[in-house]
Amino acid sequence: MTQSPKNTDVQALFNKIAPEYDKMNNIISFGTHKLWRQRVMTKMTFPVGAHIIDLATGTADWAIALAEKSDATTDVTGLDFSEEMLAIGQKKVDVSDFSNKITLIQGDAMALPFEDDTFDIVTIGFGLRNLPDPVRGLQEMYRVLKSGGQLVILETSQPDNPLVKPFWQLYFGKVMPIFGKVFAKGKYTEYKYLDETTENFMDYLTLGQTLLKIGFQKVTISRFNLGAAAVHYAIK
């Protein structure tokens, strides 16, 4: 059982919310999470014949987008610990134009089942904060990246503008859990937990510093929606 720092079984939690996950993502972010991924990928470099892994791939939206963006000889692996999320993702992969390029597997982002220096690109979208030990997860990402490979982290963040932050806290702390109760068959507790992981996760500057300490280079950061999300790019 994979426990979060708040002693929550996150695997069971994501299995439970899987049926409503895509719908809730669209509601909570007002659809902007898709635009964020597209903007992130415009700044990525896709080598010919690349090996890409998308960690915490969930229902495979980013894995499919990466397959679409890359050349025909690239392969994309999507890894997640939730079998229910992967089952939904597999259905989406099967009806996509890229089923021959994408492989979904169940696994632990903190103990990746791959050799050192395997991937040209590692991505993780809105999943790092749910790892019981994010630093260990980042160390694993460093290990499986090839020298010169790219790491891309898209994650919720905390606005630091004193005028914006109270509204952000109200939305994530009060409104989002209610959305879970109304639109996700009463899952108030689960979406309250997701709010707490966002609020308690390291800020974007600390994450950038952590990447440098692990050994990543050329760390750059962009922020979206007044700081509600941030993307970190880094090179091994």
Image (tube, rainbow, N blue to C red):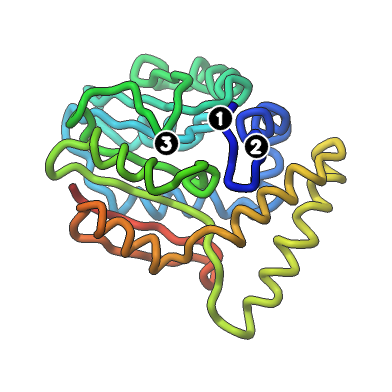
Decide which of tag 2 and tag 1 comes sooner along the chain.
2
> Which disc number belongs to residue 65?
3
Q: Nearer the viewer, mark 3 or mark 1?
A: 1
| Distance CA(mark 2)–CA(mark 1) | 8 Å
Viewer-nearest residue: 11 or 179: 11
Q: The residue under label 2 is which amino acid type?
A: Asp
Question: Which residue lies at the image location 75% right of the left edge and 55% below the top edge?
Answer: 176
| Image spot of residue 71 (x, y percent) | 24, 30
Q: The residue under label 3 is which amino acid type?
A: Ala
Horizontal arrangement in the rendering, residue 145 relative to residue 222 (left or right)? left
Q: Are marks 2 and 1 in contact (CB under 8 Å)?
A: yes
| Image spot of residue 17 (x, y percent) | 71, 33
Question: Which residue lies at the image location 52% right of the left edge and 62% below the top edge?
Answer: 157
Judge whether 205 appears above or below 92 on screen.
below
Give the crowd class for mark 2: few <14, some 14-19, many >=20 residues within 10 Å. some
Q: Secondary structure at mark 1?
A: loop
| Image spot of residue 55 (x, y percent) | 42, 35
> Which disc number belongs to residue 59?
1
Instruction: Give the residue at mark 2.
Output: 22
Give the crowd class for mark 1: few <14, some 14-19, many >=20 residues within 10 Å. many
Give the crowd class for mark 3: few <14, some 14-19, many >=20 residues within 10 Å. some
